[in-house]
């Protein structure tokens, strides 16, 4: 067939695209009242999930891929082919996938440089030849033929609007000639103007696909169940309510209105480097995100199937195949090859395998709770009823606040990765109950016996947890006390309760006391390890204004737990929290206890800075190294939104991670305040003035130069004056403490 001789008219095509978008806007096509609520009653397809695969030069990788796909339990795979691939490793892998029974999406791609030159006649003819030859060879083995990639990302796909339409027209002709199923146009992320505009143009040309595809990422919202603040900002996000469910349902409606009622999301992922910009535990966070993403996609009822991106890739794959240079084109554009020497399944691999065992083939019964910080989604199949539960990031909920005792007595609980949690049946016989966190849980009952969820179900108020450290969180409550422990399993949690509960922990003995002032701090034996110690902190007395103000806050024990949890979940050193307890009535502000790992440390920043001021330099802690490492540590702390508010030198413990390499841990965490992004400069300087109080002027200049260099700033005279003002306030406070009036008021 001859290449197209039509002369493109960019203005005309662009105008038609814009008019289609304008019509949709004026008709309310981007609004969807109630679209954020998932509908109930639809069946999740057996082959709901898929994953991208690619070949390696070494044929042994073909068997590795098939082995991991079998363990993963997916029934769909997506493979990218471009010029020359049919006679290479990808062409070798393709028939093996078909023989193994996978439903294959054959994703046909034009090379980037060729896509940029479309609709040049010669380029168009080479594209037609490639499409025709590839379909003749592999089309009968494929379930779907997907054409083009990330068309709304010209820097990745290369297409102009007319170039894209020309490439699509060629592929449409060849796919239709062979009676195959066409999918596209492969838009990336939630940008519905492209869905409206492109589908309108394709409908006018008589070239609509059979399946409308959108790579429905939700990573920019970080939490897929929450409102996407990047559409209209944080303030308006709760008004327009665009969560993942609403995005999928709106895209399905746009497709149906254009004449394509079927919708699929071929690929989406959350890259580890993107997570690590803000949080540690990137592989665990990726796995949490994956489970929550697929549950919400299934709940939406809008998607015929949804896929993850690459099976094997160091940066975003379910399997780590070894660190390699990342290709110039993003793998969402072209997943070309597997390059690593070996495969290491990540937590996300096990999370998707668990989802595949438990959810596809079931009927979605709906979201069973209200509120935006807890999610409970119900699915039924022939053998059991399953609730998938989780909280938003850093929150926790108690299972007895969700279900009654009879329901908890009959439940089987599986973690995000499908492992049954030991000791979680008959929860009412134990002292504690497992807490729900951002790491999803599957709760299973026999078919037809799924319980109701309490209308008041909600996360525990004023509580933060670090879900990805060692152990699980267990909540306990009785008529007088409540609290939380962190343990490996239920029996260990019971042991911690018995040892650390207020009725058992007692008060400080003289030999074990570390401090006794406003707070008593002492050590106790660790019931998990007789040779280890734990540190216990209890308020002893409050100043008059604190007695009034602290009644409006969580207890000091809970604030200490929250602060340490926030530090750890953001990748900053702190003594790991073990337990907190408080009197439920809250009348006595001293009746709360916080227990954490005992971190003796080699010294503290306060002691080191005092030594430097005296002209000493303790062995193993050279001043310039400490300044540089501390500046880096505090830059990370402030950059991750932690305003410490009590950053005295004694609260920064220092140990030698290696000879000459100081490591830091923060204690006394009850006053921490959080910012959604970085901490403002004024608050940063407030923290730093406290930390530098005992440091001599030359050292202070050197340290502040290093810290501010990380922000692209310099230490100004006005900032030096603020430090001097803090020094003056501290000196006056010390003098005041020596007066008889202060001692009398203190008593």
Image: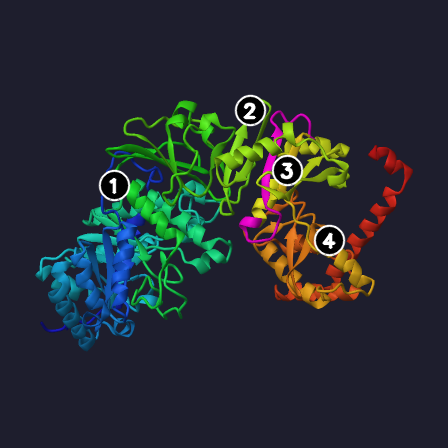
Whether label 2 touches label 1, CB < 8 Å: no
**Alpha-carbon span between mark 1 and mark 3:** 45 Å
Query: Residue 182 location in percent, x, y?
Result: 17, 57
Disc with the residue nearer the chain's start (2 vs 3):
2
What residue is pinned by disc 3?
Answer: 594
Is disc 2 placed on a helix, strand or loop? loop
Mark 1 or mark 3, which is nearer to you? 3
Residue 322 is at least partly visible in this image: yes
Disc with the residue nearer the chain's start (2 vs 1):
1
Q: Tag 4: Cα neighbours inside 10 Å, few (<14), some, or many (≥20)? A: many
Residue 44's mark?
1
In the image, the segment drawn in magenta is: 568-590
**Alpha-carbon span between mark 1 and mark 4:** 56 Å
Disc with the residue nearer the chain's start (1 vs 3):
1
Task: Report the number of discs.
Answer: 4
What residue is pinned by disc 2?
Answer: 478
Query: Residue 143 location in percent, x, y?
Result: 16, 55
Query: Residue 716 location in percent, x, y?
Result: 72, 64
């Amino acid at each position: 067939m001859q290449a197209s001789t039509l002369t493109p008219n960019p203005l005309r095509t662009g105008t038609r695209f814009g008019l289609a978008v304008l019509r949709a806007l004026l008709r309310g096509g981007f609004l969807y009242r109630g679209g954020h609520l998932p509908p109930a009653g639809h069946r999740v397809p057996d082959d709901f999930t898929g994953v991208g695969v690619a070949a390696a030069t070494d044929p042994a990788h073909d068997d590795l891929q098939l082995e991991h796909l079998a363990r993963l339990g997916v029934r769909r795979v997506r493979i990218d082919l471009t010029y020359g691939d049919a006679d290479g490793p990808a062409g070798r892998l393709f028939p093996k996938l078909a023989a193994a029974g996978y439903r294959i999406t054959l994703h046909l791609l034009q090379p980037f440089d060729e896509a940029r030159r479309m609709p040049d006649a010669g380029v168009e003819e080479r594209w037609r030849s490639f499409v025709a030859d590839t379909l003749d060879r592999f089309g009968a083995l494929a379930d779907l033929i997907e054409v083009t990639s990330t068309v709304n990302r010209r820097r990745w796909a290369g297409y102009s609007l007319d170039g894209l339409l020309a490439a699509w027209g060629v592929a449409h002709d060849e796919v239709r000639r062979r009676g195959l199923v066409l999918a596209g146009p492969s838009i990336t992320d939630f940008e519905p103007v492209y869905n409206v505009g492109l589908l309108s143009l394709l409908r006018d040309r008589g070239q609509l696909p059979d399946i409308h595809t959108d790579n429905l990422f939700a990573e920019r919202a970080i939490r897929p169940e929450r409102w996407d603040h990047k559409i209209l900002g944080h303030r308006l996000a709760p008004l327009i309510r665009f969560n993942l469910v609403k995005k999928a349902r709106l895209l399905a409606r746009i497709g149906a209105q254009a004449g394509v009622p079927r919708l699929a999301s071929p690929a989406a992922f959350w890259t580890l480097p993107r997570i690590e910009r803000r949080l540690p535990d990137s592989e665990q966070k990726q796995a949490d995100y994956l489970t929550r993403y697929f549950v919400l996609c299934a709940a939406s009822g809008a998607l015929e199937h949804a896929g993850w991106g690459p099976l094997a890739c160091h940066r975003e794959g379910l399997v780590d195949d070894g660190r390699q240079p990342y290709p110039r084109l993003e793998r969402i554009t072209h997943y070309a090859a597997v390059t690593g020497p070996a495969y290491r399944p990540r937590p996300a691999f096990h999370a998707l395998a668990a989802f595949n065992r438990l959810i596809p083939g079931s009927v979605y019964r709906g979201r069973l709770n209200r509120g935006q910080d807890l999610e409970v989604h119900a699915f039924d199949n022939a053998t059991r009823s399953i609730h998938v539960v989780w909280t938003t990031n850093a929150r926790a909920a108690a299972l007895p606040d969700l279900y009654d005792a009879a329901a908890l007595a009959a439940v089987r609980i599986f973690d995000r990765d499908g492992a049954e949690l030991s000791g979680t049946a008959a929860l009412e016989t134990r002292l504690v109950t497992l807490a729900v966190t951002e790491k999803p849980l599957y709760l299973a009952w026999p078919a037809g016996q799924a319980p109701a969820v309490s209308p008041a179900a909600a996360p525990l108020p004023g509580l933060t947890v670090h879900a990805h450290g060692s152990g699980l969180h267990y909540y306990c409550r009785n008529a007088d006390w409540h609290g939380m422990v962190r343990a490996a399993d239920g029996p260990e949690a019971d042991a911690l309760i018995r040892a650390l509960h207020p009725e058992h922990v007692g008060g400080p003995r003289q030999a074990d006391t570390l401090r006794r002032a406003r707070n008593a701090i002492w050590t106790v034996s660790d019931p998990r390890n007789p040779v280890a110690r734990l540190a216990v902190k209890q308020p002893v007395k409050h100043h008059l204004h604190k007695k009034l103000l602290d009644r409006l806050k969580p207890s000091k024990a809970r604030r200490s737990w929250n602060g340490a949890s926030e530090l750890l979940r953001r990748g900053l050193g702190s003594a790991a929290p073990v337990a907190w307890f408080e009197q439920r009535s809250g009348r006595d502000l001293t009746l709360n206890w916080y227990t954490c790992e005992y971190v003796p440390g080699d010294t503290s920043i306060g002691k080191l800075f005092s030594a430097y001021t005296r002209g000493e330099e303790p062995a193993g802690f050279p001043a310039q190294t400490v300044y540089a490492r501390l500046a880096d540590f505090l830059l990370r702390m402030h950059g991750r939104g932690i305003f410490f508010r009590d950053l005295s030198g004694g609260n920064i413990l220092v140990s030698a991670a290696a000879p000459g390499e100081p490591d830091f841990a923060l204690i006394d965490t009850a006053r921490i305040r959080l910012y959604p992004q970085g901490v403002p400069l004024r608050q940063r300087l407030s923290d730093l003035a406290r930390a530098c109080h005992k440091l001599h002027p030359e050292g202070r200049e050197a340290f502040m130069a290093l810290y501010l260099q990380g922000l692209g700033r310099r230490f100004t005279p006005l900032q030096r004056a603020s430090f001097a003002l803090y020094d003056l306030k501290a000196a006056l406070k010390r003098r005041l403490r020596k007066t008889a009036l202060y001692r009398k008021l203190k008593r």
